[in-house]
Image: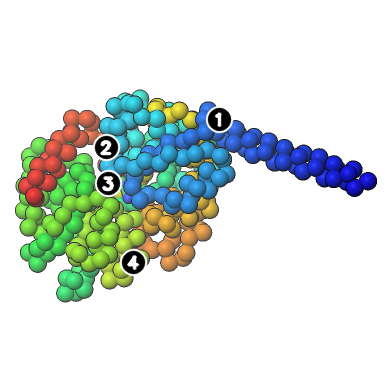
Amino acid sequence: MKALVRAFILVFIIAFAFMFLSSRLNATQDFAGGGKTLTIYNWGDYIDPQLIKKFEQQTGIQVIYQTFDSNEAMMTKIEQGGTTFDVAVPSDYTISKMKEEHLLIPLDHSQLPNLKYISPRFMNLSFDKGNKYSVPYFWGTVGIVYNADMLGGKKITSWNDLWDKDLKNQILLVDGAREVMGLSLNSLGYSLNDTNEAHLQQAKAKLNQLTPNVKAIVGDEIKMLLANEEAAVGVVWSGDAAEIMSENNKLNYVIPKEGSNLWFDNMVIPKTAKNVKGAHAFINFMLDPKNAAQNAEYVGYSTPNEKALKLLPKDVSTDKRFYPDKATTDKLEVYDNLGKRMLAHYNELFLEFKMHHK
Ligand code: SPD
């Protein structure tokens, strides 16, 4: 009798283990589709690493995660080939360039049910009508973060304030050609999409005059330097300002009164993708309101996900500096796709300024 019970228990354990393993396998196959790995190419400091782990656990897909620090670097790498990126996160004008150069795979919206959580304000934008190729990840502005205490109580409200003689060696600039050329163009009253050569040369000459005030032109380390009060002023993307301000309450963020850039970073599937089904699963996972809210809390950037926004602490979601209303953002400019030659020219002028600074 004892032997019969033991045999029964053994059969039960084996059957249970089999059912469990086969359900795990099915889940993995369902999500993984074409493959067991997924290569993601994103900006540095732009995701909560816990979410990557959660995605891996939920799907059985192993994520290979790589980062870039500019749209230009990202696009060059994809253009050159030899990579297998399944998901990338370019900005507005770069999405339009990538579409033009046939570097993107159209999205299958039936695999993205969570797309319904994105606010209509961030859908159907000019760089990708109908969101055929891209879905919103984060959005924001370019502005100035400053430490009023370090400036003797002085407030900053405009791009032109950066040229103040009292700011000698106090400014950190984000390492971006469009951002730095844009601030100089805006300070002169020109559009940050200006292509008039005389205006561009004027902007470059004005940047050279900013050199004594510029301490460094830096990447993601700008956050640590400003939070540690190594400099009093930084030209940054809004989400970076939000993160630094949570670490140092002497800092403030302002969108300069002459105008600035409004940008949108969206998820796309590059033509290099090897796991298109997994890429859709990842994009849909990041669109899930709980995951999107966790990501926004972690990186500090503004979420376009309406339902995620409701999950954020009230003091975050109602902060007009990082969630400006439509009336405010309508006055800002989105970068245009200026074409290959003009973008190369902007980069060249920025590089000359960087050399001048050294
Ligand atoms: N550290 C993450 C930075 C991402 C910023 N993207 C902004 C793009 C603006 N064109």
Q: Is residue 100 visible?
A: no
The residues bearing labels 2 and 3 have C-alpha atoms spaced at a distance of: 23 Å
Mark 2 vs mark 3: in front: 2
Q: Reading the chain from its start, which is encountered first: label 4 or label 3?
A: 4
Q: CA distance from mark 1 to mark 2?
A: 29 Å
Contact between marks 1 and 3 (CB within 8 A): the answer is no
8 or 302: nearer the eye?
A: 8
Circle 3: residue type: Glu
Amino acid type for the residue under numbered disc 1? Gly
Disc 1 target residue:
33
Work out whether residue 229 or residue 300 is closer to the camera in this orientation and state it.
229
Q: Choose the circle earlier in sequence order: 1 or 2.
A: 1
The number of numbered badges drawn on the structure is: 4
Numbered disc 4: secondary structure: helix
**Spot occupied by residue 291 in the image (x, y as percentages of width and height):** 51, 51
**Mark-to-mark CA distance, 1 and 4:** 42 Å
Mark 3 and ligand 1: say if the CB distance to the nearest ligand atom is below 8 Å.
no
* Mark 1 CB near ligand 1 (8 Å cut): no
State the residue at coordinates (38%, 63%).
Answer: 319
Residue appearing at x 18%, y 34% in the figure: 344
Nearer the observer: mark 1 or 3; the answer is 1
The residue sitting at 20% across, 35% down in the picture is: 343
Compared with 266, 234 (above or below) is below
Callout 2, which amino acid? Ala
**Does dot 2 land on a helix, a strand or a loop?**
helix
Depth check: give the residue in front, 246 or 37.
37
Label 4 sits on residue: 247
Q: Which mark is residue 43?
A: none
Give the residue number, with chain letter if any, for mark 2: 73
Whichever of labels 4 and 2 marks the residue nearer the N terminus, that label is: 2
